[in-house]
Image: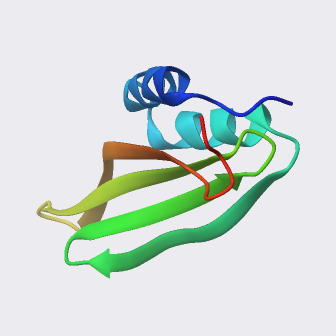
Amino acid sequence: MAYLNEQQRSQLRDDLKKLKFNQAKGRVRRMDPKARLVYVRNAQQVGRWLTRYDLEGLGTRVTLIEENRVVNDDQKLENEWQMVDVIVEPLPDNRN
């Protein structure tokens, strides 16, 4: 399988940003049979949660960034997760 070049990574980022989190996660997992989940909802920044996949067959790393907002209704507290950004970058061995 060929590695993705810069233009293809940019196109992938634009496509993933239009999707909801679960749809984007499913699409990334189906793209490459060698896809590896690195971490799920890892809080490395305040108010942002990151989920990262390494697509080794495509030479690409995809990071999905979500924000959480707490909604206070009269009866209960609820969390609203919203995907705000996607980072698509090459793996070290991808020179395209």
Residue 30's x, y, as percent? 77, 34
Q: Nearer the viewer, residue 91 or 75?
A: 91
Left or right? Give the position of 65 relative to 1: left
Rendering quarter of residue 3: top right
Left or right? Give the position of 94 relative to 31: left
Left or right? Give the position of 96 relative to 57: left
Residue located at (65% from left, 39% from top) = 28
Q: Which quarter of the rendering shows the C terminus?
A: top right
Residue located at (56% from left, 68% from top) = 40
Residue located at (86% from left, 49% from top) = 34
Q: Which quarter of the rendering shows the N terminus?
A: top right
Rendering quarter of residue 53: bottom right
Q: Nearer the viewer, residue 11 or 15?
A: 11
Rendering quarter of residue 72: bottom left
Residue 93's x, y, as percent? 69, 54
Q: Nearer the viewer, residue 25 or 9?
A: 9
In the picture shown, does residue 8 fall above or below 28?
above
Left or right? Give the position of 82 relative to 71: right
Q: Nearer the viewer, residue 71 or 37?
A: 37
In the picture shown, does residue 24 fall above or below 40?
above
Residue 39's x, y, as percent? 59, 71
